[in-house]
Amino acid sequence: MSHRPPMPDDPPPPALTARAEYRRYMLAIALVGAGFAALIAIPALLRSPAQTRIIGDVALICFGLLPLLICGFAFYAVLMAAIFGINTLERGGRGGLRGVRRRTYRLSQQADETGEQISRRSIDIGSRLSSLDRIFERSDEDKHESDTEQSK
């Protein structure tokens, strides 16, 4: 029988059963436990300090430095992904911020022009109504005089 390549209509290969998965996890735990047991038992059997030091160095590397390196790499990868994402967001938002800056500048220019126009108009109206000041001053003087006469 020859092995034929899978056809598009073929069902996918069966996944591991729950029992097989459980056995696989238990085997991994047993291997790690055997390694720990070996690292504890072997130095007790060795008589020379040099041999014990070698086992201690291997244990430090396997159970201290390698997990630290793996976790450090994961932390480094997360930081690099975050920096890349922030940089992408900043580049994407740069155009929008330029538009906001342009619109703000235009609005401030329009506000300045409108303020100047209002100032000119108020000065113009004030100069046109300055002739009425004399009338108001006379009426105020007349009113003041009538008030003083009534109070006497």
Image (cartoon, rainbow, N blue to C red):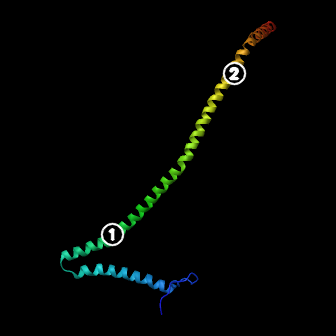
The spot of residue 126 in percent (x, y) is 70, 17
Give me the residue at 47% from left, 90% from top: 2
| Dot in front, 2 or 1 | 2
Query: Who's the residue at 35% across and 66% down the image?
Result: 69
Task: Kindly state the secondary structure of the residue where label 2 is placed.
Answer: helix
- Examine the rendered structure and indicate whether residue 73 appears above or below residue 7: above
| Relative image position of residue 36 (x, y in whole percent) | 33, 79
Front in this rendered view, residue 106 or 74: 106
Compute the Cα span from label 2 to label 1.
81 Å
Q: Is residue 118 above or below residue 147?
A: below
**In screen coordinates, is 142 left or right of 112?**
right
Determine the residue located farthest toward the bottom in the rendered image. 1
Q: Nearer the viewer, residue 17 or 97?
A: 97
How would you rate the neighbour count of disc 2 (Cα within 10 Å): few for under 14, some for 14-19, many for 20 or more? few
Q: Classify 10 Å Cα crowding around label 1: few (below 14), some (14-19), many (20 and above).
A: few
The x, y position of residue 38, in whole percent, is 30, 81
Compared with 119, 18 (above or below) is below
The residue under label 2 is: 122
Residue type marked 2? Ser
- Res. 64 mark: 1
